[in-house]
Amino acid sequence: MSQGAFTPRIGKRPRPRSTPHHRNVDLPSSDTASILGASSVDDYLSAISGADARLMDEQDEGTGGETDDEAGNDGTDTDDLTGGSLISPEGADVGLPSQRARTAFTGFKDLKLELILLQALDAVRPFGAQHGRKLDAWRSIVQHLKDHDVIEQEAGRPAVFGLVNARVCQAKWNTLSDEYAEHLREMRRTTGANPTLTKRLQLMGAIYDYELSCKEESARKKQKRSHDNARKESNRVNGLALMERSRSGPSRRSPSMPRTTTVQSDDILNPESMSSPAGLTRSSSGCFSGTESDSSISIISSSSVRNPRTPGLRKRAMAEFANETIKTAADAIARQTEYQQKQMELLIQDQAERRAAEQRRMELEVQDKEERRAAEQRRMELEVREKEERREAERRRMEWEENLRREQKLERDESHARFQELLKTQRDVTAATISTISKQNAEASEKLIMAILQALKK
């Protein structure tokens, strides 16, 4: 039995899958509305998982309530097959094991849980796992998250990764990978920008680069396997007719028959052995001697012929068969050499293309660095110019304030001088008025005294 062959369990049959996207079924209006109205990948997966669970429950009811243990799950993790964990749906009897539904984990909407997932991916890195063990690698990530829950519960905090599974982690990483690829494309478009490298972007970048390297390594291995398989198939096809004809040759040889060349299938598959004279002539007494004329080689050794008469029919048939075998082997060697030359030319062309691509990449990197340096220089020049403009504006503002203060001081001095002049004028007027009144009072007093004196004289 070949490795990796499927061996079904005896006495158990696998549970048939019936998902909305695998069969033409009529979904309820609520499920259709929830699927079509999903705003994100997590909501879409949750809606699909809920519809899948309800359809599987209906199928269980139609088949007599077959449980997961009866269907051959054998206690394994069924979350990885449906994208969610088992809960009891609304309106269903919790006591019936067949009426269980699955729900998707939607906790990765929180950036803290997303960062924990990225740390687990950076620690496990399941992309380099061998074929057939990738699911175990993704389950190791789930175990890593469950260990984090254990630590959180020991610290008195609630568990958050109770419903997580391998498929949800893989779907979330696919979303993050697309997001990071879009981020890289955006960064290439906006040259000269200074990105803020957060811990989330650093982890996404490291995991994204590792995934790309694993994909490139897998593609190289696949190409090498296909090349080896094509070479083996070519050798098999070229040597099949020779092996069949060598098997159908005479099983016995008369004592007078000369020894001839026996070409094995290994010689056809190994061009190096056929290219040497020792590989072409194998006999018990040594190498045969012959001459090549018109692409034909004489196989019968002249030293082994007992009489000079013409060989018999069997001898001629053996000689013709040996000559044809050697011709076919030589043609196979020529085809193999031509194939190797073509492969070498393709390899040289591929290496030249890779060197040209690497040269273009380096030129683009140098150009990108120069553009970033020029953008940084322009940014610094703009900053210096902005500082100078701010300094000039500040100087003009200070000059304006100084002129304003000077004008206000001049106005105050002028108003004070006018006030002093007005006060002096008012004082002069008051003094003149007082002097006039005094003179008038003095004249009136004199007149009154003179009148009194005259009155007294009379």
Image (spheres, rainbow, N blue to C red):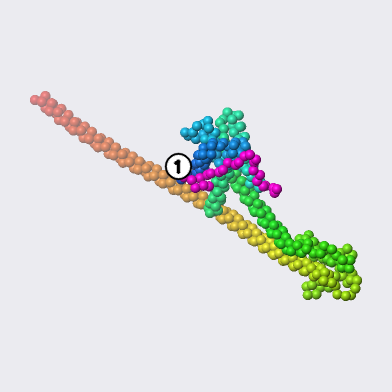
Camera-side residue: 389 or 339? 339
- The residue positioned 71% from the left and 64% from the top of the image is 339
- The residue positioned 11% from the left and 27% from the top of the image is 454
Q: Is residue 430 visible?
A: yes
Amino acid type at mark 1: Pro
Examine the image and state in which quarter residue 85 appears: top right
Camera-side residue: 398 or 18? 18
Does residue 371 appear left or right of residue 228 in this picture? left
> Eyeballing the image, is 143 above or below 368?
above
- The residue positioned 54% from the left and 37% from the top of the image is 64
Does residue 432 appear left or right of residue 328 in this picture? left
Q: Which residue is mark 1?
A: 28
> Eyeballing the image, is 154 above or below 399?
above
Point out residue 30 in the picture as x, y percentages from the top left corner.
44, 41
> Eyeballing the image, is 209 above or below 257?
above
Magenta segment includes 367:
no
Look at the image and give the residue range highlighted in magenta. 1-28
Magenta segment includes 27:
yes
